Image: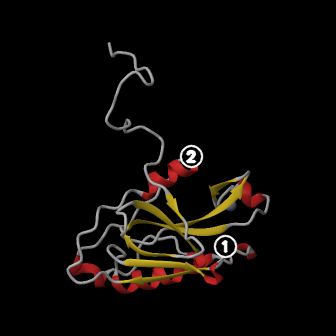
Amino acid sequence: MAAQKKHGSEWNMQPDSSDRRNRYQIMRTPPNGIRNLIILSHSPLGRYTHRWKGRTVPCREIDCRACEQEIDRRWYGWLFVKIKKTDQIVCFEYTSAASEAVMQYFNRYRTLRGARLDAWRKNDKANGELGMSIFPPKEHAEAVPVAPSREKFLSVLWDVSIKLTEAAEPPESERSLIERNSLNTPVDQKRNGRKVD
Ligand SMILES: [Zn+2]
């Protein structure tokens, strides 16, 4: 018979694998901007969300209670990044205003991994429109760490179980052959006539 587990009864070097707290923090761009983030995630990935009862919830698209009440939807994208200065890994959140820059880079270079990202707020305001520049890695750039799972991170952040399939990183030789990836891009941001970000 398995011994009964009691909370806090053992000393551990790290939490259980079932621990539901996020190891990573979400990072939004401060008014004075941020430079030198190294992107770890392979592909762009985002989703429409609502501010619902004081928290952010993913839009369910079908039978969405927030949509039924005509609460604004906003698209956000998330990329795991490494802050070059400190080596800290965080989940960087960007808005639809900056999504074009991400897609352009991705379409051209076929992966975001290793790219350098600078972000700023237009007008230096906390809620100013987000601007982003993405630069290819320098030649002989150091290997970048494996990207944490955005599925896991966002499930814990929103306290819901989301399922998403991250596009697999293609081998270098095949990158030019890839026509499309299973990505959520904000192409339908004017859907239903709702204004988003
Ligand atoms: Zn919705």
Q: Does label 1 or label 2 sit earlier along the sequence?
A: 1
Query: Mark 1 and 2 residues: CB-CB less than 8 Å, in contact?
Result: no
Taking depth in this image into account, of 137 and 44 the one nearest to the observer is 137
Q: Element type at marker 2?
A: loop
Taking depth in this image into account, of 97 and 67 the one nearest to the observer is 97
- Tell me the quarter of the image containing the C terminus: bottom right
Q: Which residue is mark 1?
A: 127
Q: Amino acid at mark 1?
A: Asn
Q: Which residue is mark 2?
A: 159
Residue at coordinates 68% horizontally, 78% vertically from top-left? Answer: 190
Residue at coordinates 39% horizontally, 60% vertically from top-left? Answer: 89
Residue at coordinates 31% horizontally, 36% vertically from top-left? Answer: 13
Label 1 crowd (10 A; few <14 / some 14-19 / many >=20):
few
Inter-mark Cα distance, 1 to 2: 25 Å
Image location (x, y in percent) of residue 49: 63, 62
Residue 161 versus residue 81 in the image, above or below: above
Residue 173 versus residue 19 in the image, above or below: below
Image location (x, y in percent) of residue 57: 63, 55
Taking depth in this image into account, of 107 and 64 the one nearest to the observer is 107
Taking depth in this image into account, of 86 and 197 the one nearest to the observer is 86
- Tell me the quarter of the image containing the N terminus: top left
Q: Spot the residue most to the right.
A: 69
Residue at coordinates 57% horizontally, 70% vertically from top-left? Answer: 30
Render colour scheme? secondary structure
Q: Quadrant of residue 125?
A: bottom right
Q: Quadrant of residue 120?
A: bottom right
Image location (x, y in percent) of residue 102: 46, 79
